[in-house]
Amino acid sequence: MADILIKNGTVIAIDPDRRIIADGAVAITGDRIVAVGPTAEVEAAHPAREVIDARGMAIMPGFVDAHAHAGHGLIKTLGGGKSDPWYQACRGAYTVGSTPEFWFAEAQLAALERLRFGVTTGVSLLGGGDSVMRTDEPVYGDAHMEGVLGIGTRSVVAVGTTRPPHPLTYARWEGETRIDYPVSFDQQFATCKTLIDRWHGSHDGRLHLALLTPTLHRGYQETAGAEEAVAQSRMVKQFAEDYGLVFTQDGHTKDSVRIAKDVGILGPRTLLSHATGLDEEEIAICAETGTTIVHNPSAVAAILARCPVTELLDAGVTVVIGSDATAPDRSADMFRHMQQCMHYHRTHFHDPSWLPPGKALEMCTIDAARVLGLDAEIGSLEPGKKADVILVDLRRPHLYPAHMPEFRVTYFANGNDVHTVLVGGKVLLRDRVAIHVDEDAVLDAAQREAELMIDRLGLRYALETPRMFWGHSRDTDVLD
């Protein structure tokens, strides 16, 4: 007997046959899927203790968000679009302005947002990624992991080292007293190793670690600590290879892929984010090395330069979608990012034939699972895989009439249409309510920790409505 039978829905399996089953069902025993097929067949073979009627809903694999930032959830919109106060908040929070309570509260808020949007697995960089990571002491990563565990989703947490020269100044707080201390590369790397030993693959495989180093851009040879940056990147990448971890870098753009090749850090387990402005040679480098790309179509970087997604795909490179959430102007809603992705590249070519919706769906399900090395477990609805399943309510005005559901969920749905979410066979969201979480407590803790961080860093001014918010065609203050 199965534990859970989800029946009477439209199954969009994203399995090898890309089956769409109009009256379909999924049977679950323990944390795994045991059958996917027509309702009559699955129900007859797998009677279950609990039955979920998915009539009027799409049954899909949970989304995989391949790039986001832990910490950003309590900083989003600070500065009102101006980069200086935004980066001041990020750099301050991720070095001297945050406490373990901040990281726990932010992790809970971000994981709850993901859950409600049907994102069952997400990559989260523990801080600013390319510039500042909160890896001075393990306590901050520990707090983040505990926060995610309390919500119940899966997370791949990227930890790593910061840009030389070192040491950098970090701080801990004892009450209202700030205690500064220097942090070396060796200390950051040791923190990463501790977190990997403590958390990687733990809790039935719900938590994984990845490693990162800062991206080296054009002209880096003239910067202080250039030789150390190369040596450190190679060292961290080799450790990731030895331990079978994903190695990722944030903020790649023109020439940085060539530099990464010269440094020797590309390969099938390397995931480069943004990757804007790449030329034909860099596209070929990605293809030759098996390096994978995470495209963030809603990010500011995608406004400044284009990620050549279609050209990469045609060259045989795996490209997936990331939200780059949750700031300064974007959420964790993968429906939004799929739609943005399709329109972004169609606009570039002035041609609506590019990036069919099925490809967009693959990019945030099975393809994203594959680049994380998790495609044997998640990313599609197949017997033997983990039961990470979402139900999308199709009986909504913007999704009717009930034709072509594989188009409707991609073009018209949004995160608030997610009705039910299971992770590892456990129902975490039912009728749009997180059933094991006190949502008010999560929101209140997030508000409290954000206020404390803002006051520690003197950022009250960054909450003011911008001078050109109303009545202007352009906010030129953003350019200052």
Image (tube, rainbow, N blue to C red):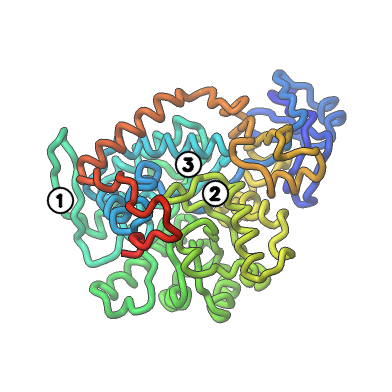
- In the rendered image, which residue does mark 2 sit on? 65
Q: Which amino acid does label 1 sit on?
A: Tyr
Label 3 vs label 2, nearer the camera:
2
Secondary structure under badge 1?
strand
Would you call the spot at circle 2 few (<14 residues within 10 Å), some (14-19), or many (20 or more)? many
The picture places residue 143, in percent across and down from the top left corner, at 34, 37
- In the rendered image, which residue does mark 3 sit on? 207
- Cα–Cα gap, marks 1 and 2: 34 Å
Question: Residue at 31% across / 42% down in the picture?
Answer: 140
Would you call the spot at circle 1 few (<14 residues within 10 Å), some (14-19), or many (20 or more)? few
| Residues tagged 1 and 2 counted as in contact (Cβ below 8 A) | no
The picture places residue 315, in percent across and down from the top left corner, at 65, 73
- Cα–Cα gap, marks 3 and 2: 14 Å
Q: Please identify the quarter of the rendering in which residue 480 is found.
A: bottom left
The picture places residue 74, in percent across and down from the top left corner, at 36, 41
Label 1 vs label 2, nearer the camera:
2
Q: What residue type is labelled 2?
A: Asp
Question: Residue at 61% across / 32% down in the picture?
Answer: 421
- In the rendered image, which residue does mark 1 sit on? 181
- Report the front residue among 211 and 399: 399
Question: Residue at 53% across / 54% down in the picture?
Answer: 322
First of labels 3, 2 by sequence position: 2
